[in-house]
Amino acid sequence: MKKDLVSKNIIKELLKDIARYFLNLEINEIEFLDKELKRIEKREADIVAIIDNSFILHLEIQNSNDKFMANRMLRYYVDIEKITSLPIKQYLIYIGKEKPKFQTKIQKDMISYEYNFIDIKNIDCEILLDQKSPEALVLAILCDFKNKKPKDVIQYIVNKLYEYTNHNANEYRKYIMMLEILSTNRNVLNEVKEAEMLREVAYQDLPSWHIGFEQGIEQGIEQGVSKGRLEERKKAIEILYSMGIDIATISKKFNITEDEVKNLIKG
């Protein structure tokens, strides 16, 4: 339950940016209606709010197919309508890997109902990555990376978050927490944690910081090692090993033998 509540709070904090980049909506004032909607079950990204005192926004983020989604959304609509006379805009944002198979409308008997559906794969990740905004970078974790390696994109996001927060530790950690929680929807939490570790051991001083995600972090590590940054390498290896990354993986990443890894850990 705690994770669900934290996730919901993060979605709330990012709602204006979600609306801007995913829904093509510019919003200013938000009044959340959690307490008024007792019957709507608590779901990880279930958001209902009055927007600019002009309409109700109901947002669902879904990472798997649900053949009963239209029925659920209709039930939500009925619940919301009970407490307001404002127009209601409903959106489902799908971030799953499988091909979407959602029923988005109900045409049955005397019922005619439909909600807005957005497949995250149709959102260009580059648009978010190009924004000089921590919020946009955090949301980029939900987009489809196209032909880019997830590890490279995530390293780029983490590096830029540090840069855009002006190296402010508290601000940086706030956005990293958001990134970690949202990354669970894409099953890339381990990659996020690894990217954090690589940044924290001063790899922003290596060529990889400037190379960017197109060429990848591994190349930068190899270049840094070849320049003799032995202490940084030793520290990085110790941190990765303490986090449970196996010796074989560390050996491959740093292009050294497993015996060398073991000696550095012992030393």
Image (tube, rainbow, N blue to C red):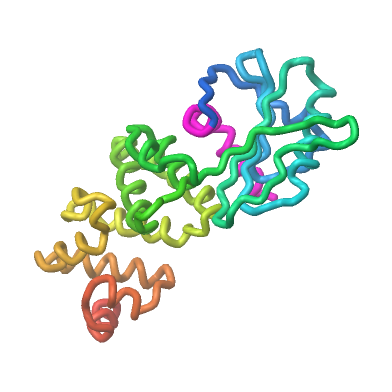
Where is residue 199, by image quadrant?
bottom left
Q: Is residue 98 left or right of residue 196?
A: right
183 and 123: which is toward the camera: 123
Residue 177 can be seen, yes or no: no
Pinpoint residue 223: horizontal percent, then vertical percent: 14, 63
> Which residue is at 28% across, 83% downward?
258
Pinpoint residue 35: horizontal percent, then vertical percent: 76, 29
Tell me: residue 47, above or below residue 249. Answer: above
Tell me: residue 252, above or below residue 210. Answer: below
Span shown in magenta: 1-22
Tell me: residue 115, above or below residue 155. Answer: above
Tell me: residue 65, above or below residue 252. Answer: above
The C terminus: image quadrant: bottom left
Pinpoint residue 215: horizontal percent, then vertical percent: 23, 56
Magenta region's main secondary structure? helix
Pinpoint residue 41: horizontal percent, then vertical percent: 78, 42
55 and 98: which is toward the camera: 98
> Which residue is at 67% across, 20% downward?
50
Residue 229 can be seen, yes or no: yes
